[in-house]
Image (cartoon, grey):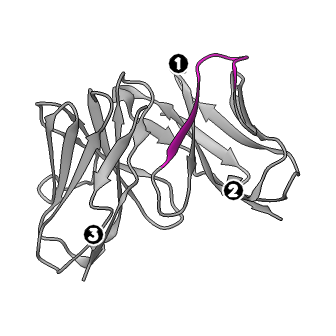
Amino acid sequence: EDQVTQSPEALRLQEGESSSLNCSYTVSGLRGLFWYRQDPGKGPEFLFTLYSAGEEKEKERLKATLTKKESFLHITAPKPEDSATYLCAVPGGGNKLTFGTGTQLKVEL
Amino acid sequence: GAVVSQHPSWVICKSGTSVKIECRSLDFQATTMFWYRQFPKQSLMLMATSNEGSKATYEQGVEKDKFLINHASLTLSTLTVTSAHPEDSSFYICSATPSGSEQYFGPGTRLTVT
């Protein structure tokens, strides 16, 4: 059974204070790893797909990386508008996603 | 690109009535659509998977007679909550995939049953 674990559960940063979120996974044959951002009362917003170890993707202040066991979402010089819950997920049989429990990020002025 | 809409965004209904939620992929054809439920401060819980023109596949513990799913076309899926009760109050989110890989999510529908 696929398993996805995210840490930390919650993270509070000052504006400009860079940090990383972790997503550890156990799957039988990785078919991709997805990162999403979810704001309160909204559906998840797609951020990145990573397919193989060593792959990196960037978007504005976010960079996602992938190893054989985990993925990191690096946030560089975050701003208050980056505050959200960040979810990672892996696809399994029938393309069903197994989600981590998410990291709730709050960026303060 | 890859925009998914849901309607309505919120709905209040009385106990015993039925509510229909629509999910549309606006700029792509969706081979598969998914319906999720999310409780406060919890992750998404998959309810069912639907493919156009075929019956939905429900996850264990999800009542198929209560949550009716119809995937009428490659851009439209509907979820009908029948005989709704207060415990059905939740945030319902759909997703769609154009290629069987990434899922793109709708904005969600907040259902409150009084």
> Quadrant where the N terminus of chain B lies?
top left
Q: At numbered mark 1, what does the secondary structure look like: helix, strand or loop?
A: loop
In this view, B93 is above or below A21: below
Q: Which range is magenta?
A: A44-57
Q: Amino acid at mark 3?
A: Asp
Residue occupying the point 28% across, 37% down: B33
Question: Badge 2 is on which residue?
Answer: A81
Q: Are marks 3 and 2 on the same chain?
A: no
In this view, B99 is above or below A6: above
Res A5 → quadrant: top right
Q: At numbered mark 2, what does the secondary structure look like: helix, strand or loop?
A: helix
Question: Badge 1 is on which residue?
Answer: A29
Question: Badge 3 is on which residue?
Answer: B88
Q: CA distance from mark 1 to mark 2?
A: 35 Å
Q: Amino acid at mark 1?
A: Gly
Tell me where residue A4 appears, x and y as whole percent: 58, 40
Task: Give the left or right position of residue B89, taking residue A42 as reference.
Answer: left
